[in-house]
Amino acid sequence: MLGDSLPLFFPVLIFMLSLWLVADKVDRYCKRFSPMVEKRLISSYRVIPIIMVLWLMIVRARAIITRDTNHVEVANRLGESDYAFSDLKLLISGDGVGEFALLLLLIFSLWTVNLPSMSTAPYHIRKAVQNKVMLYVSACALLTFWIFFPESNYYSPDSFPIQPTMSPNGDYAVVMVIAATLMVAFSAELFAITSLQQEEDFIVLKKRALLKTYLVSAIVLIGFYFGDYIEINWVSGQVDEKVIATFILFSQALILAFICVPGKRSDNLLRVGEARTKSFAIMSLLTLAILIFITSFMLQNTSEYSTGNRYLEESLWLTASFTIMLSITQILPRYGFDGAARPEYWWLRITILFAPALIYWFNHLAIFIIPALWCVASLTIVLPNAIEQDAITPSKQGFGLTIGSIVLILIITSTTVNMLGYFILIGSTSMIISNITSQSIPQH
């Protein structure tokens, strides 16, 4: 297996992906060298991850074609059967799903500098978008690397099964894998839009990226529903981790589309900022209260936590984890990370965006905090305008609808047999209403 023959392969891949997180700084460092060396260094650290992931797919394809029974997936799914071209579908639907998705995302990241929707923008703007897309894709890849690239897929086990024990067709529908991959790609575009301030250069890109994200997210949600994932037991620990990771990425797509992008506009509409400190203090208190209450509610509605006080213990742990992350990010504006109109709210939304994936490293119940985070996110783009004294206030009806939708969704989902599952299905309604309300706020 590749992990045994090349033990440094994955550490190097992780290191190269980490460089994508700070592409701006790496590019500036490369400028210290001559133009020829600079060009080669920049090309190398950008292209090497693509080559490495492509090599993973080639190794897997070769094992499938030659029926190498010393390869884990071949032993588990195909055995010594005759090769058929359709077997290569396993590159997408089987253990290689992470390799396929990451390869497409890495290629897309570099291609974004040529996006048709930004063809008239200056090169430095297109380059900035490319770097932000690279950052988002690499962040998602690194946060979920242990899920999509587990050691068991790349290191030889002590013994191989005598007969195949898993489906030769793979575990995932090809359409859903492609839709989920596109969802992450389009989310990366939205992340770039919300991270950069050149609003006039992103008019076409924003419109197209939002439409594409709406479409593929809807397909993924339909896949969740018809795949019977809404009804599964999320506490048992028997849920496929790749499904949970996909749900977390789905949550990120919705937050970017319905909250982060419109939040950029609503923050820009805020004026000098009278009662700005009061606004964020109230938002912080509401965040803590919502996280504790809704997360506890979600856990208590499961059979495992329906009795006793363990649900409260877990909800406090999850809330504390998020609070620690938020506290760290709120320090960053003091050190120059304050490019947004309201950096405190921008960092709050970014923490909401990535916190579930980080918390999931340590606690498999991390997905139970997502409903509360969706509710908090809904308030971040309407509450400042309602509290700050010199801000343009959103319509009272829209603000009331946002609060009312949160309460109504909680009541409806609490009557179902799987509260978390059905919240996934309809919970984004509050973010949609909040989005519409924020869009109704007039320009100065």
Image (spheres, rainbow, N blue to C red):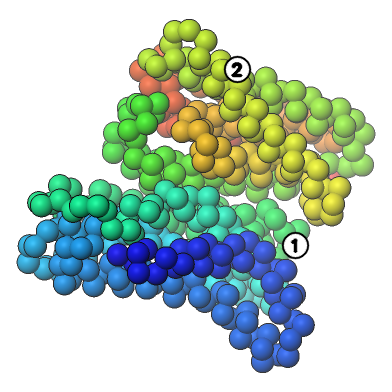
* Quadrant including the N terminus: bottom left
Q: Hey, which quadrant is residue 350 in on the image?
A: top right
Q: Is residue 359 visible?
A: yes
Q: Residue at x 44, y 75 (%)?
A: 51
Q: Are marks 1 and 2 in contact (CB under 8 Å)?
A: no
Give the amino acid at mark 2: Phe
Q: Secondary structure at mark 2?
A: helix
Q: Position of residue 390 (x, y in %)?
A: 90, 34
Q: Is residue 207 above or below residue 19?
A: above
Q: Secondary structure at mark 1?
A: loop
Q: Position of residue 14 (x, y in %)?
A: 52, 62
Q: Residue at x 31, y 73 (%)?
A: 58
Q: Mark on residue 198?
A: 1
* Residue designated by label 2: 293
Q: Is residue 334 above or below residue 233?
A: below
Front one among 221 and 294: 294
Nearer the camera: disc 1 or disc 2: 2
Q: Is residue 12 above or below residue 219?
A: below
The first of marks 1 and 2 along the sequence is: 1
Q: Mark on residue 224?
A: none
Q: Assess disc 2: are there few (<14), some (14-19) or many (≥20) residues with their C-alpha within 10 Å of its C-alpha.
A: some
Q: Is residue 439 visible?
A: no
- Give the total of numbered labels: 2
Side of 130 where 441 appears, left or right: right
Front one among 86 and 49: 49
Front one among 165 and 247: 165
Label 1, label 2: how far apart the Cα atoms are: 38 Å
Q: Is residue 116 above or below residue 393?
A: below
Give the amino acid at mark 1: Gln
Q: Position of residue 225 (x, y in %)?
A: 33, 35
Q: Assess disc 1: are there few (<14), some (14-19) or many (≥20) residues with their C-alpha within 10 Å of its C-alpha.
A: few
Side of 206 where 89 appears, left or right: left
